[in-house]
Image (tube, coloured by chain):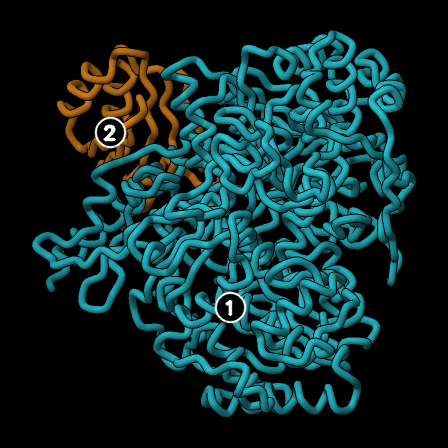
């Protein structure tokens, strides 16, 4: 899976709230959405007319962030994950 | 609220921002993408929203919007499903447009410069000052010492009263508009080829075409809703998109084929396509025999770089054989050498146009229009469609897109150019007589001589010839070419500057009087989009403070100058009253405008509006009631009813890269921002998605100069310089030897660097080509 970074000017590791654009393989939308909905600390916003999902993650620690990230990488059918933004909630 | 609640709210807000940033980025990648939840979230639950229809405030596509108003505030925007333009879709700018009016730095009161400081002034007093100053300047220096500079974003009534004041009442043609900067070449292209302005087809062509060929046109970012409609046809029925451009963009990536050419050589490639069409016997002989003439004009026509540059073309009729002979210099093999387009790709393009069984639409916008041979390249694309007879039919036609919401409706149809009148041109006696009759002014009042086109207008300010200028709905000190000359010019004491705007801009910074304008939905109005569609809207919310519609400001100044009888409109109904007066100029089957009651009901109506019906394909007798020559087609803009195929050669750009300045500079736009960014940079979601400009470089050029992503780069021309962060392999990818810079950022003024060369026929500047050098900072 390719990871594309849109916001390259921020230290994304220190940001507990991030947003991503997820692209998945053709015909895998429903399966992927089911997998995403199972994850904690995630908000899933599917596009109505494209095979694209916006994902907002909200974690309390870098450790939780890494766990979530690894869970995302394990989802089958996920083609690209583009990191768009990171925010510090403090 | 306790601390915990505050943190929850803040976290929730930040998550929304994060979601919005991703949705904005997705919209840039997938034009027309819909996130239903985003729209629904903006709508208060249980609220009693009053949905009001109107056009989008931004680009020339003219999408229909519905604005949800509650308690006098615009709280939601969604696409109008009844609009034939966008069928409910909107782009990222469209969804968020209404947010800008809540910006904290709105201009809410008039500001008058006194002893170097801006003093808050009651609007009536400020209008007194403007009228007095304008009148005094005319008395002292003559009527041609005052000027107005308006916009393709002005509403139809705003453009109309500006024209009536300047040309009818004062009697000067010192009126031009920023549409000169974006589509004047399209106008002269249409007039020279067809004798009638504006596209013959409509957006419904998208539903029928087999091929879309985009000429230097990044529609995915600039006309995203239309591009989305094209992608739908690509996916559903296999229509093909061919991107012909100087730079790889989001449009290229979404197209079936991307063909890159060396800047300026589109002229040669278009001729090579014509050569191939003729050489392969793909000419629609019957069509050209019945409906076309052949002409040639002057060559080596200059670039307008010197003040008071003057040019007049001298058309001469030629025949098909002479045209064929001329094209011998444009074989694919010869053109390939300097265009950097392969022979195979030139032949591929020609074969698409030449295939009688395939329908082809050509789209273009600034890439072709902002060109020192802008009129010529428009003519050349028309040549291709005329030679093959692929014109004025569903799915077949050349289509010049506009950049602004009413570049067609106001600038072109009302005529806010120096040479124009609401019907026809100032040089034509009959047109002047018609204007004098409708305006109720003496015929002699209307001068027969055009004065300053945009570039020359600001040169005249610099020279001290113009001593009073009033700009409305535009931001020239970001958008003009070579602002390095025109900013100091506008700062000179020799010219009194009045600026009407909604927000502070670099142009208001040099004003002597700043007038607070209402935004789009804070006033009623009409726009006209790229497909000849007139769109009406009613005022939806109140503007803040003393803000006033631009049309009403003009009327108030006209009355103070003693022209009250010519401007008898009421404050409440001036939009309707002005439109009804204006409509008289276009009576008849060739340009009839829809009555107000129809426009108020419908989500836009196309002209010519004849017997209760929009005309979708002009010049085709099957669809256009104005065709009366008894043939299948009638190009009635020309006296003999025939379109013109023009012999137009390739000529080089005004300035090309050399040893000292080795790069081409190309400038343009991004999906997030509307032109100079004065509105969209005040919409947090859009600003955060694209917070500043940048310079795109080819990775090999970046390597050569040791430049990495994000590093500051100074871009310098013979006019000036601008420092921006580097962008390598991100949004777009220029060819080697070329850099690209978006112009929306007032803090990184790339137009200090650009050149004010223009097409000698259209007088439209070329923002796409000049020579620069780059340095790592």
Q: In the image, is B219 to the left or to the right of A51?
A: right
Q: Position of residue B436 (x, y in %)?
A: 63, 73
| Residue occupying the point 74% across, 45% down | B766
Q: Position of residue B611 (x, y in %)?
A: 40, 47
Of the residues tagged 2 and 1, which is closer to the observer?
1
**Residue at which label 2 appears:** A46
Quarter of the image where the C terminus of chain B is located: top right
Quarter of the image where the N terminus of chain B is located: bottom left
Work out which residue is located at the far right of the displayed protein and give it.
Answer: B300
Residue B776 seen in the current view: no
**Residue at which label 1 appears:** B158
| Residue occupying the point 62% across, 54% down | B179
Query: In the image shown, does B394 or B462 lie closer to the viewer?
Result: B394
Relative to B287, residue B519 above or below: below
Relative to B325, residue B689 above or below: below
Q: Which chain is orange?
A: A
Residue B184 seen in the current view: yes
Work out which residue is located at the far left of the displayed protein and give it.
Answer: B46
> Chain B rendered in what hue?
cyan
Residue B777's label in the rendered image is: none
Q: Categorize mark 1 by other alpha carbons within 10 Å: few (<14), some (14-19), many (20+).
A: many
Q: Position of residue B385 (x, y in %)?
A: 65, 25
């Amino acid at each position: 899976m390719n990871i594309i970074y849109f916001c390259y000017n921020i230290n994304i590791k220190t940001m507990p709230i991030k947003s991503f654009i997820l692209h998945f393989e053709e015909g895998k939308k429903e399966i992927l959405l089911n997998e995403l909905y199972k994850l904690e600390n995630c908000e899933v916003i599917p596009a109505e007319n494209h095979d694209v999902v916006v994902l907002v993650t909200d974690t309390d620690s870098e450790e939780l962030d890494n766990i979530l990230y690894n869970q995302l990488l394990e989802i089958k059918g996920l083609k690209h994950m583009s990191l768009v933004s990171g925010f510090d909630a403090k | 609220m306790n601390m915990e609640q505050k943190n929850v709210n803040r976290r929730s807000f930040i998550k929304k921002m994060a979601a919005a940033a991703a949705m904005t980025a997705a919209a840039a990648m997938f034009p027309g993408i819909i996130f239903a939840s985003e729209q629904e979230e903006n709508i208060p639950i249980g609220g009693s929203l009053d949905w009001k229809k109107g056009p989008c405030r931004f680009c020339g596509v003219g999408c229909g919007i519905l604005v949800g108003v509650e308690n006098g505030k615009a709280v939601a925007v969604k696409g109008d499903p009844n609009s034939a333009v966008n069928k409910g879709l909107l782009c990222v700018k469209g969804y968020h447009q209404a947010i800008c009016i809540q910006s904290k730095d709105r201009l809410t009161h008039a500001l008058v410069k006194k002893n170097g400081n801006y003093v808050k002034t009651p609007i009536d007093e400020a209008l007194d000052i403007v009228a007095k100053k304008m009148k005094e300047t005319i008395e002292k220096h003559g009527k041609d010492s005052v000027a107005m500079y308006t916009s393709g974003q002005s509403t139809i009534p705003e453009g109309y009263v500006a024209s009536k004041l300047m040309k009818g009442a004062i009697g000067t043609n010192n009126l031009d508009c920023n549409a000169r900067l974006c589509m004047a070449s399209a106008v002269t292209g249409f007039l020279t080829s067809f004798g009638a302005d504006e596209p013959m087809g409509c957006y419904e062509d998208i539903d029928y075409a087999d091929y879309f060929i985009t000429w230097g046109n990044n529609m995915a970012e600039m006309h995203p809703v239309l591009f989305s409609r094209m992608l739908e046809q690509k996916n559903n029925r296999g229509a093909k998109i061919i991107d012909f451009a100087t730079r790889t963009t989001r449009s290229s990536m979404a197209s079936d084929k991307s063909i890159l050419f060396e800047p300026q050589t589109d002229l040669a490639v278009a001729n090579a396509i014509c050569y191939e069409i003729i050489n392969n016997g793909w000419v629609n002989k019957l069509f050209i025999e019945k409906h076309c003439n052949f002409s040639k004009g002057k060559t080596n026509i200059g670039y307008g770089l010197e003040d008071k540059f003057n040019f007049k073309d001298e058309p001469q009729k030629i025949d098909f054989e002479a045209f064929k002979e001329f094209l011998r210099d444009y074989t694919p093999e010869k053109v390939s050498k300097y265009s950097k387009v392969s022979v195979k790709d030139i032949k591929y393009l020609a074969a698409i146009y030449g295939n009688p069984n395939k329908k082809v639409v050509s789209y273009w916008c600034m890439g072709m229009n902002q060109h020192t041979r802008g009129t010529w390249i428009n003519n050349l694309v028309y040549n291709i469609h005329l030679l093959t007879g692929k014109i004025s039919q569903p799915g077949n036609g050349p289509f010049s897109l506009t950049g602004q919401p009413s570049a067609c409706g106001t600038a072109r149809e009302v005529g806010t150019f120096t040479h124009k009148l609401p019907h026809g041109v100032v040089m034509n006696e009959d047109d002047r007589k018609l204007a004098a009759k409708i305006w109720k002014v003496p015929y002699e009042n209307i001068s027969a001589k055009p004065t300053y086109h945009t570039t020359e207008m600001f040169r005249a300010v610099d020279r001290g010839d113009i001593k009073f200028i009033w700009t409305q709905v535009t931001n020239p000190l970001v958008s003009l070419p070579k602002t390095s000359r025109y900013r100091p010019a506008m700062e000179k004491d020799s010219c009194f500057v009045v600026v009407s705007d909604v927000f502070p801009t670099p142009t208001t910074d040099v004003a002597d009087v700043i007038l607070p304008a209402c935004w789009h939905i804070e006033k009623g109005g009409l726009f006209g989009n790229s497909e000849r569609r007139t769109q009406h809207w009613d005022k939806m919310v109140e503007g803040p403070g003393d803000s006033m519609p631009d049309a009403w400001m003009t009327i108030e100044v006209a009355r103070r100058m003693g022209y009250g009888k010519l401007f008898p409109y009421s404050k409440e109904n001036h939009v309707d009253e002005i439109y009804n007066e204006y409509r008289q100029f276009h009576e008849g089957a060739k340009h009839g405008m829809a009555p107000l009651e129809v426009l108020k009901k419908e989500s836009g109506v196309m002209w010519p509006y004849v017997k209760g019906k929009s005309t979708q394909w002009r010049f085709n007798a099957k669809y256009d009631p104005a065709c009366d020559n008894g043939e299948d087609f009638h190009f009635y803009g020309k006296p003999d009813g025939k379109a013109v195929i023009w012999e137009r050669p390739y000529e080089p750009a005004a300035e090309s890269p050399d040893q000292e300045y080795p790069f081409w500079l190309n400038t343009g736009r991004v999906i997030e921002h509307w032109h100079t960014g004065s509105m969209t940079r005040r919409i947090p979601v859009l600003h955060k998605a694209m917070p500043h400009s940048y310079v795109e470089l080819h990775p090999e050029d970046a390597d050569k100069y040791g430049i990495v992503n994000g590093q500051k780069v100074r871009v310098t021309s013979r006019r000036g310089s601008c420092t921006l962060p580097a962008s390598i392999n991100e949004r777009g990818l220029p060819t080697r030897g070329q850099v690209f810079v978006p112009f929306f950022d007032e803090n990184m003024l790339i137009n200090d660097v650009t050149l004010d060369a223009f097409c000698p026929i259209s007088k439209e500047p070329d923002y796409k080509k000049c020579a620069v050098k780059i340095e790592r900072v």
